Image (cartoon, helix red, strand yellow):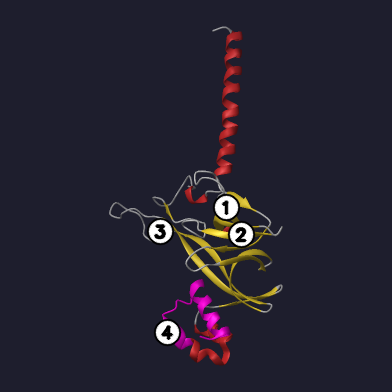
Amino acid sequence: MSESMKVMLLGLFAILYFPTFGQSVYTIRQSDVDMGRAFRFNPKSDGVKGTPFLYEEAPKAKIALKSGKIYEEIPVNILPEKDEIYIQTGDMEDEPLLLKNWEWLETLEENPRLFKLVYLEGKERVVEILYEDGRDKYIALHKKVLVQPTQIKDGYTGPQYENYRGDTRFYKVNGLSSKEFKGNNSGIKEISGNKFSSVRNYIKQNKIKTEQSAGMKKVLAFIFEGA
């Protein structure tokens, strides 16, 4: 093959290859928002169960923007790691969009949940509002933690998976100050004061799981509003 022919072929290869390569990188970066389908090159297990997003299946929500506009029935999900809100505006096959300039959102579930941006731990965080009493806000900060398999894989063990496990912490926030409280007896006693005995009975009778935000929301309503 002549030198001129080689040069022409190399030039054609560069034209065909490099735009495709650049487009692939762009596509990968865009699809990073769907982290529930992401994988690592060197996984320590056979796969990953769960999702880094707060919800396994995105619920619909009412969303209020800072401009004053309110939108209904918008599929939404929360990425706790980055304190980001994503919405689905088209078909479910379309890529989700990062939502900015939002003020609050309320999920349209059987038990609606209210989320806002609150200054916590040195920055604005997406938190669930459990109760507001004047300037005091009682909130839940949600996280997703990737847990490694506990067993050492060998020829006798079945498939092992990394799991995204939910973790919730509770805070009382007033302006820029905040204080964490636990969902155990000591934490609830600190909040309820002389009502602790009746609050504890309420929890037992209704089998409330105070380590979960839904349970703590009920307890706070009982403390401040009564039965």
Q: Position of residue 176 (x, y in %)?
A: 71, 72
Q: For mark 3, what is the residue?
A: 149
* Disc sitting over residue 204 in the figure: 4
Of labels 2 and 4, earlier in sequence is 2
Q: Position of residue 224 (x, y in %)?
A: 58, 84
Q: Position of residue 40 (x, y in %)?
A: 48, 47
Q: For mark 1, what is the residue?
A: 87
The residue type indicated by label 1 comes to: Ile
CA separation in Å, label 2 and label 1: 10 Å
Q: Which residues are magenta?
A: 200-227
Of labels 2 and 1, earlier in sequence is 2
Q: Position of residue 55 (x, y in %)?
A: 49, 59
Q: Are marks 3 and 2 in contact (CB under 8 Å)?
A: no
Q: Does residue 41 belong to the magenta stretch?
A: no
Mark 2 or 1, which is nearer the eye? 2
Mark 4 or 3, which is nearer the eye? 4
Q: For mark 2, what is the residue?
A: 63
CA separation in Å, label 2 and label 4: 35 Å
Q: Does residue 215 belong to the magenta stretch?
A: yes
From the viewer's perspective, is 91 left or right of 103?
left
Q: Residues within 10 Å of mark 1 (few under 14, many from 20)?
A: many
Q: Are marks 2 and 1 in contact (CB under 8 Å)?
A: yes
Above or below 4: residue 59: below
The residue type indicated by label 2 comes to: Ile
